[in-house]
Image (tube, helix red, strand yellow):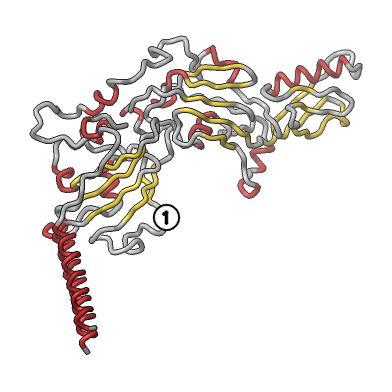
Amino acid sequence: MKAHIKVCLLSAVSCVTLAACSSMKTPANIEEVSRGAGYQAQYRATSQTDNETAFLQSASMNTANCRPEIGGGRNSDIGKWSGPSLNSLLGEKLSRNDLVQVTVDGDELLSKAYVVSRDGNLKLPYLPPIPAQGRSTAEVEAALAQALVAENFYETPPRIAVRITDFASVSVGVVGAVFEPHAVEIGGVQGDAMDTRRQQALGASTEGRNLSAALRAAGGVRPDADLSAVELHRQGRIYQMDLRGVFDGTDPTDIMMLTGDKIVVKSRMCFQDDLMRPSPISPPGVSLYLSNLTQPATGNAPSAIGRESRQVPYGTRFMQAVVNTNCVGGAKTTNANRSAVLFSRNPVTGVSVVIERRIENLLRRGDRDDYDPYVLPGDAIACYDSAVTSVAEIGRVIGTIGAATLLLND
């Protein structure tokens, strides 16, 4: 019986040793990432001796197959937030469940707080419903004055003030070239976070109900987004907006969203490197999910990673993420040949991709930006130790098996 167990243990040692000596298979991908045919041209692993590959060609390779921008040049007719064609969308607009304070000069019966009803109307006593959804307070004031005269409450329009005292959350649909297309709810404020003094002040507003907040709530715009003609569908009309100025900071105005709005972001079907940086409509960051921390990091707690994922800025590259997640460093003799693997997905086609890089090679290449891909939301990274470290691990395993063999002999 003991002899049989020894044979099994020796077989296990042989299998472990052979596994350490064998090399990992190159990841197989449906997309031809080696030729730059993936979502990012940076996915390809070019050779430093390849004369056909000059420095920093990835950006031009990415844009080679871009569809033309719908909005055309920067001076196109597509509306800008600061331009006259979108004036009707700017300013405060009432939406369902907004709380307003109506003051009719000399009328205590009508002067009180009201909530915009589910059908988008203000309902005051003895008056027909006053349409409020999508209107400014000035438009509601005019409609209310007209209704009071029409119902013979006044012979001439009275002085009226309508003020928003609390902005309700709104539900907005976001589809197209965003990382998480879905209906989002934005603008709500929890009770313990309310600023009552601000609510009671004249002119109080909110930034939480803006279009940029809706795009960020849907994961932010993807690198293939066509920002030249983003569509806003509202109450049967379609507005086209040029958001390129929002991205680079030259058009900082924003639009307040209403319940029932829909945002459509078209795709240029290509990766645009210049969109891989933080902006009001970009993803708030990238969460990295680590697998198999390597030798310098003995565990999550000692590495200060904690049990949650690690957050890095949007626009972080693979090499930066590998360093950030403690995959780099340690003794050169045991860790110089470590590799890291990036698991990503093409958001346009839904095809997964696996990219493997030798960390030391990536560190020392002058053209690293050419094949150092950007990390996207939802990506994951796995680190693999060097062969020397693996052999050391085998020694530890053999020692454990040897100790077990001695116990069996006793």
Q: Quadrant of the N terminus?
A: bottom left
The residue at 16%/70% (across/down) is 395
Q: Around disc 1, counting alpha carbons within 10 Å, would you say few (fewer than 14), some (14 to 19), or many (20 or more)? A: few
Rendered position, 284 above or below 35: below
> Can you name the residue that lies furthest to the right here?
152
Q: Residue at x 64, y 20 (%)?
A: 235
Residue 297 image-quadrant placement: bottom left
User: Residue 359: x, y in percent?
Assistant: 19, 48
Q: Is residue 185 above or below residue 358?
A: above
Query: What residue do we see at 26% from left, 41% from top?
Result: 28
User: Which residue is labeled 1 in the image?
Assistant: 308
Q: How many marks are shown on the rendered structure?
A: 1
How far across and down, in percent of the image, does residue 152 sit? Answer: 91, 16
Q: Nearer the viewer, residue 120 or 109?
A: 120
Q: Nearer the viewer, residue 255 or 274?
A: 274
Q: Pick the residue in front: 63 or 251.
A: 63
